Image (cartoon, helix red, strand yellow):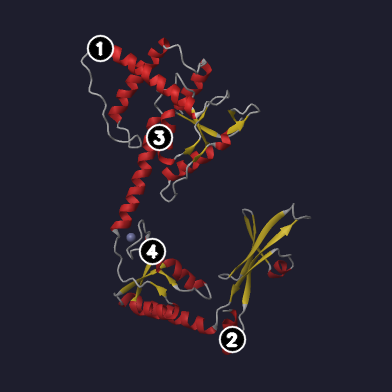
Amino acid sequence: MLKSALEQAEQEDKSTLYDLVAFVSHRGAGVEFGHYVAYCYNSVDGNWYEYDDACVSKVDEADVLSREAYVLFYQKRSTDASENFKARVLELSAIMNETNSEAFYISAEWLYRFRTFSEPGPITNSDFLCEHFGQAPLLQPNQVFPIPSKIWSLLFEQYGGGPPCDRLMPCNTCNNRVLDIISRKTREKKAFNLLGKRLRYVTVLPPNVIAYSWYEQWDCFVTHFDRAAPGPIRNDALLQKQRDGSMRLRSGINYKSITREQWTYLHSIYGGGPEVLLTYDKQPCAEEIHSIVQRFEEQLAAVERKAKEPIVELPSSDNEEEDSKLIKEEEDSRIEEQETKSCSSMILIPDLKHEKSSEDVTIAVNANTE
Ligand SMILES: [Zn+2]
């Protein structure tokens, strides 16, 4: 490859030239100390500029040459042939733009490379086309540029690449995929916020915590369209193993306090773990949490059955939808009502593993009203 390039250069009897366009300079005694500044050449006004953090100032070329360079950036100089070709294309496009209605579409990013690089490389219309050769979803008007067909032929013949595109067609497959992603993000965010108001287990368990780094990734995912979903929840760093083998919440670590309902919801989608509770006492294991929850549910059911005895029985909530589906507002108010009942009924249930101090409850309530 290298040999053939050299041979070609010899054949053309031309040496490749590079121009220095920028360099990084270091000020200070050692590599561990000091300050970096950059010097860049502006080809539009022919001046050198110094970039010192937010401060940009014009500098004399002689001054620039006296500086010590740390990293240098060179730009390959265009050959006469390629410059002539570019000039011909630009000239032609200026003439044809108004008269020629038959248009091809070309990547605006590639056009930028064509105008500024010595070798723009093959045309990259995949910048604005999807894998089905339709218009990429959420295409911005400035990402694609119409050009006369004659100009397209010239460029395509010279640089290759593609694919040729003479009309922009929306792609249903890709558009639906994007709509699915958007609705998933909206659904997750809404459900998470809604579940933040649930305090069903507040009397038997401290709130859950989730590693802040993971939560941030998830929050970015649901807030921004172009962010990918996070992987499984990673709560391992929240725990510290004690000498006796037990696990405790590590102090000074960043976490987000969430309700158990929020935890269950996120865990049902993303998996991972482990479940960590907001307590500096020994962390209960998954089985312990499970049995506390189960016992609580059983006691709650018993209390509810008793309370409902003289009244006409309500239809059981036989909702087939998974937990991960968006919780309906109306159902929400019904459960909140139940929760109010359950909180007061809890006073009657003495035999629960977790004895809650009033401080714990305050944390829980605060965490859930954030
Ligand atoms: Zn597509």
Q: CA distance from mark 4 to mark 3?
A: 37 Å
Q: Quick one: label 1 or label 4, which is nearer the N terminus?
A: 4
Q: CA distance from mark 2 to mark 1?
A: 96 Å
For the residue labelled by badge 3, is the local secondary structure a helix, a strand or a loop? Answer: helix
Q: Which residue is mark 1?
A: 309
Residue that label 4 marks: 128
Disc 2 + disc 4, Cβ < 8 Å: no
Return the mark for residue 265: 3
* Residue where numbered disc 2 is placed: 7
Quarter the N terminus occupies: bottom right
Residue in the foreground of this view, choosing between 270 and 49: 270
Mark 3 vs 2, N-terminal side:
2
Whether residues under marks 1 and 4 lie with C-beta atoms below 8 angstroms apart, the answer is no
In the image, residue 177 sits, relative to residue 283, either above or below, namely: below
> How many angstroms separate mark 1 from mark 3 (CA)?
32 Å
Q: Is residue 74 left or right of residue 235?
A: right
Mark 3: amino acid: Tyr
Disc number lying in front (1 or 3): 1
- What distance separates the C-alpha of mark 2 from that of mark 4? 36 Å
Q: In front: 112, or 287?
A: 287
Amino acid bearing label 2: Glu
Marks 1 and 4 sit apart, C-alpha to C-alpha, by: 65 Å
